[in-house]
Image (cartoon, rainbow, N blue to C red):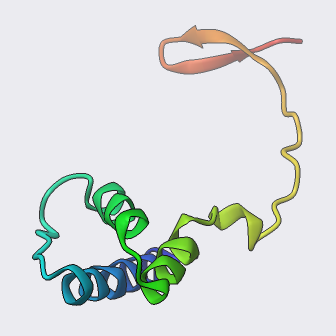
């Protein structure tokens, strides 16, 4: 999920929570995603819970990633340049 899609879903969840619970959520504060998910768990509205479930799923499940290929091992740095094991 891209950042734009994630933000759109957060805004949808915010609006649904404000409508369901009659509260206002400040989006400029830090940790808004965690607060919205906590409020959604407390809500009894199935639409709000469905929105929260779509946000709570990890993005890696939708996009399979290839395993990382091991490169040369970096032993340390000298003058900002990496020293590789030989």
Q: Image height check: is 57 above or below 72?
A: below
The residue at 57%/77% (across/down) is: 54
Q: Nearer the viewer, residue 72 or 48?
A: 48
The residue at 64%/62% (across/down) is: 58
Image quadrant assignment for residue 26: bottom left
Image quadrant assignment for residue 12: bottom left
Q: Is residue 64 left or right of residue 11?
A: right
Quadrant of the image containing the N terminus: bottom right
Percent from the top left, x then y, of residue 32?
Answer: 26, 61
The residue at 64%/9% (across/down) is: 76
Q: Nearer the viewer, residue 33 or 22?
A: 22
Image quadrant assignment for residue 77: top right
Percent from the top left, x then y, of residue 33?
Answer: 34, 62
Q: Is residue 43 left or right of residue 21?
A: right
Q: Image height check: is 50 above or below 19?
A: above
Q: How many labels does the image show?
A: 0
The residue at 89%/42% (across/down) is: 69
Percent from the top left, x then y, of residue 43?
Answer: 36, 72
Q: Image height check: is 15 above or below 69?
A: below
Q: In this view, does 57 lie to the left or right of 44?
A: right
């Amino acid at each position: 999920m891209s950042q734009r899609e994630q933000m759109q879903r957060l805004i949808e969840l915010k609006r649904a929570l404000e409508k369901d619970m009659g509260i206002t959520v400040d989006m400029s504060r830090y940790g808004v995603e965690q607060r919205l998910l906590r409020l959604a768990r407390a809500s009894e509205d199935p639409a709000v819970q469905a929105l929260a479930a779509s946000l709570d799923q990890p993005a890696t499940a939708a996009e399979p990633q290839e395993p990382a290929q091991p490169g040369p091992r970096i032993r340390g740095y000298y003058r900002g340049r990496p020293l590789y094991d030989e």
